[in-house]
Image (spheres, rainbow, N blue to C red):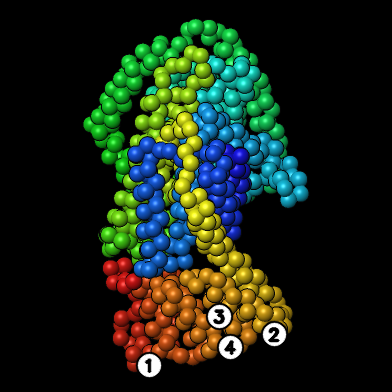
Amino acid sequence: MLLVAIAACLLYAAFANGATDLPAESRLQLALAVIATGACAAWLYGNGLALRASPLGWAGVALLGGFAVWTGASIAWSVAPDRSWAELNRTIAYGLVLVCGLVLGSSLPRARERVARLLALVSIPVALYALGGKTLPGIHIGSLIDLDQADVYNRLRAPLGYWNALALFCVTGLLPMLQLAADPRRRPGRRVGALLGVLVLVLVVGMTYSRGGILALAAGLVVLVALTTERVRTVVFFASALVASALPLGVALSRPDLTADVVPLARREDDALVVFVTLVLVAIGLALWGRLLIALEGGRFTPERGRAAGRPVVVAAAVLLGLGVLGAIASGKAADAFDSFKSADKVARVTDPNRLLSGNSGNRWTWWEEAAGAWSAKPLAGWGAGSFPVTHRLYRRQLLSVQQPHSVPLQWLAETGLVGLLLGGGAVLALLAAALAGVRREPWALRDAPPGRGAAAALLAVGVAWAVHAFYDWDWDIPAVTMPMLLCLGVLAARPATTARPVAARGPALAAAVVAAVLVAVSAALPAIARTETADALGTVGADQVSDARLASAAASAQLASQLNPLAVEPLFAAATIAERRGRLDEARARLTDALRRQPDSVDGWIRLARVDFARLDRAAVRRDTLRALGIDPLNPATIALARRAQANSALPSESPSATGSPLPTQVPVTQATP
């Protein structure tokens, strides 16, 4: 039941745009709190669940718990305290998933095989839904199913809403799916089905155009092949699926209507049908080829032979890689590649399939520099969890706004400082080490029982793929891709319990667990309810003709949202907008002042306040507001325009820019910015 509940959470997160925003993430956190409470009750009273882990596993749990505490503590100094609260809720949810993984690994017979099979099965409906955008985009069933997800961007991203996240989610399922296909103890029909699943997942990864997803897949494959007992089968089956995917992938990438953006459905359906027919024919051929491979296996591919053959192959690959790197350095190509990686003016179009051949970082180097600058200002404690959308404005050199620096370690450094990196990064490293030890404890070959080492290797490969991908993307903020990683590492870090041990003081322990679950649920629900109330209030203001009674009701909703989330500024912004609509400028200014007391570094708040002060004809206040906004966001065109208006309206003719010859600069140097 616990395993099924976790599977349901993973599916929900995937089909809720990755559960990256409210209220979807709050619903997920509420579900996890309920699941964890039920597991705790079963552990205390049911004598069916156990909780054991290796020392490194417990170290990972402790470090993750410390990271959650540090994240919560950062609310006190955060420049975006409401975002820090959201980060705290997310980290607590991740901790619950990790503990559930430990419980499964300790209690469930053949837990590693079952969790690996779970991840493989969960990935298929997600991959098929995504692939529908390139094969059957015309299918539409009410509000339940709409496969026309490539109507704006040709690059696959649904249902997670982000192409790199979709690629990583498919990698998370592909690695255990490949292990199932290569497992000789399974029925031939199931192995062929798993091979077809690998084909579908490879196609989706390719159609996301995600270079990060391909790199994560490569890292996971290296780990899987190095640690599994079925090395030869794993390589042969993956190569078969890869070769089979070339034809439908080539068709999809060569059709102009499928590689261009904003193409009408009627023009895409014919090309999509060609891709679909090609895929069906290739799948039939791959299934026949898979059956032939299984029939020819016999006793040729024993674990011992695979182990013996693997060592020289690994050594040869390492030597070739080293020689390639040395050759690139000697020829100067490495320096050119690094310059291309850093360049911000050679970014390929984000939905162009040719970007797969580009070495450009897609502006990541720029964002990494911004994160490094933010960390250098507050190296120990950071600016507060979730604060990068605010702090990057101080250090940016271009107008492109971003929510994360697209690197989890750098995000932790900028937001939570060195302490946060040591806690969060230490938790991941400790869990990876515990997982590796768990894989190595599995016997190399079991002849009379279902193999556990291959499944364990697949779970560790998922963790390594996530860790590699997290270096250049914002995976920590995407529950749909981080939860599977923590589940895998938790299962591997656990130690199976032979007998369930009775727990003393079960009543008080369960009461404490229930109280903790209620607190977690309340903490998760309040921001979501506040967001809904704020949206309802703003929806009323957006109407052309609104009675004063409805405006008063909307103001009450905004006030309630402000009380439910005392750290957020959006409810107060909504209240100020409603007050402006009612002609109450002094009240609007009061609400904006309250918002800036909560978040003094909100550039949006200072811009709104300046506009209200313009309407109130308070020139001195407008000048103060715009200067403060410029200090927080020097490159913002809105703040620069407001500053020009403020200067034009406040200066006497003899003091005007044209008279003094010193006009307002178009940019304020970042070094002059004061938080």
Q: Is residue 440 visible?
A: yes
Marks 4 and 1, the one that precedes in the sequence: 4
Marks 3 and 1, the one that precedes in the sequence: 3
Q: CA distance from mark 3 to mark 2?
A: 15 Å
Marks 2 and 1, the one that precedes in the sequence: 2
Marks 3 and 2, the one that precedes in the sequence: 2
The local crowd at label 2, few if under 14, some if 14 to 19, many if 20 or more residues have their Cα within 10 Å, is few
Residue shown at 28%/68% (left/top)?
671
Q: Does the CB distance between marks 3 and 1 fall below 8 Å?
A: no
Residue shown at 55%/63% (left/top)?
522
What residue is pinned by disc 3?
576
Front-most of residues 423 and 462 = 423
Q: CA distance from mark 3 to mark 1?
A: 31 Å
Left-right relation of 363 to 296: left
Q: Residue furthest right?
A: 142
Left-right relation of 300 to 381: right
What residue is pinned by disc 4?
584
Which amino acid type is shown beneath numbered disc 2? Asp
Give residue 446's mark: none
Residue shown at 37%/54% (left/top)?
67
What residue is pinned by disc 2?
548
Q: Position of residue 515 (x, y in %)?
A: 52, 59
Give residue 652's mark: 1
Which amino acid type is shown beneath numbered disc 1? Leu
Marks 4 and 2, the one that precedes in the sequence: 2
